[in-house]
Image (cartoon, helix red, strand yellow):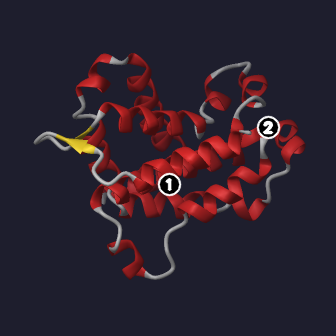
């Protein structure tokens, strides 16, 4: 059930021809809402934020459907040929980078999840080990520039606490779960 919805959102976002508006390059409200829905579907930060995080996480799509991780990895893994990325337009590349960052952080959170939570779904270890590869691809794809230009410059983000929390959580998870990448970026 969740897999079909999430894949539909990913496909809709990738097929949008011109999801930005105005001189700032901010996403239009519909594209932003779809993107935030996708980011929330990939969010596993509840595992390390709350005491009852394990119980809440059991209800999340990435935990309930073990095949979802491999399907998303197939769609979001960096292309094997560098020329393939040049065919994507800038907005699509930014969207892809943001999804890669979110999935990479979710996999990093799953690697640190309690064993009792993972026993139920048993994601393959090699899938979880792709977290750093996804985060590297997101950084190379300009994810933080995309966040600044397309998302944070939107008036809707400034007025929606729901969106602000997810962006804050995404950046906080990056700092906590990928501190080595942060140190690499500083150099």
Q: CA distance from mark 2 to mark 1?
A: 23 Å
The percent position of residue 54, horizontal first and vertical second, equals 76, 28
The structure residue drawn at horizontal position 77% and vertical position 53%, both measured from the top left corner, is 67
Dot 1 crowding, Cα within 10 Å, few <14, some 14–19, many 20+: many
Residue 154 higher or lower than 38, as above or below: above
Which residue lies at the image location 30% right of the left edge and 37% below the top edge?
A: 151
* Viewer-side label of 2, 1: 1
The secondary element bearing badge 2 is classed as loop
> Dot 2, how many residues are within 10 Å of its Cα: few (below 14), some (14-19), or many (20+)?
few
Q: Is residue 162 above or below residue 33?
A: above
Give the residue at x 79% y 49%. Answer: 66
In the foreground, 116 or 138: 138
In the displayed structure, would residue 25 be above or below residue 140? above
Depth check: 68 or 8 in front? Answer: 8
- The N terminus - image quarter: top right
**Residue bearing mark 2:** 114
Front-lying residue, 5 or 107: 5
Question: What is the quadrant of residue 114 in the picture?
Answer: top right
Identify the residue at image location x=43%, y=58%: 138
Considering the image in quadrants, where does the C terminus appear?
Answer: bottom left
Question: Could one spot residue 113 in this view of the protein?
Answer: no
Q: Please say whether residue 50 is visible from this viewpoint.
A: yes
Which numbered disc covers residue 54?
A: none
50 displayed left or right of 121: left
Horizontal and vertical percent for residue 3?
69, 45
Q: Residue 175 appears in which quarter of the rendering?
A: top left
Q: Which residue is labeled 1 in the image?
A: 100
In the image, 17 versus 119, the foreground residue is 17
Percent across and percent down for residue 24 are 14, 40
Q: For the view shown, which residue lies furthest in the left direction?
A: 23
């Amino acid at each position: 059930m969740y897999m079909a919805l999430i894949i539909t959102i990913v496909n809709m976002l990738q097929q949008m021809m011109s999801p930005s508006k105005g001189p700032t390059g901010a996403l239009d409200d519909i594209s932003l809402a779809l993107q935030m829905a996708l980011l929330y579907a990939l969010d596993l930060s509840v595992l390390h934020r709350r005491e009852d995080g394990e119980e809440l996480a059991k209800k999340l799509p990435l935990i309930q459907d073990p095949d979802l991780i491999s399907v998303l990895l197939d769609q979001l893994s960096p292309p094997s040929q560098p020329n393939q990325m040049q065919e994507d337009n800038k907005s699509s590349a930014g969207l892809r980078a943001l999804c890669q960052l979110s999935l990479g952080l979710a996999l990093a959170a799953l690697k640190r999840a309690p064993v009792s939570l993972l026993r139920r779904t048993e994601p393959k270890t090699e899938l979880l080990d792709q977290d750093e590869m996804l985060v590297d691809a997101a950084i190379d794809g300009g994810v933080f520039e995309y966040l600044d230009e397309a998302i944070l410059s939107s008036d809707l983000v400034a007025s929606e606490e729901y969106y602000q929390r997810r962006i804050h959580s995404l950046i906080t998870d990056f700092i906590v779960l990928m501190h080595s990448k942060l140190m690499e970026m500083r150099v």
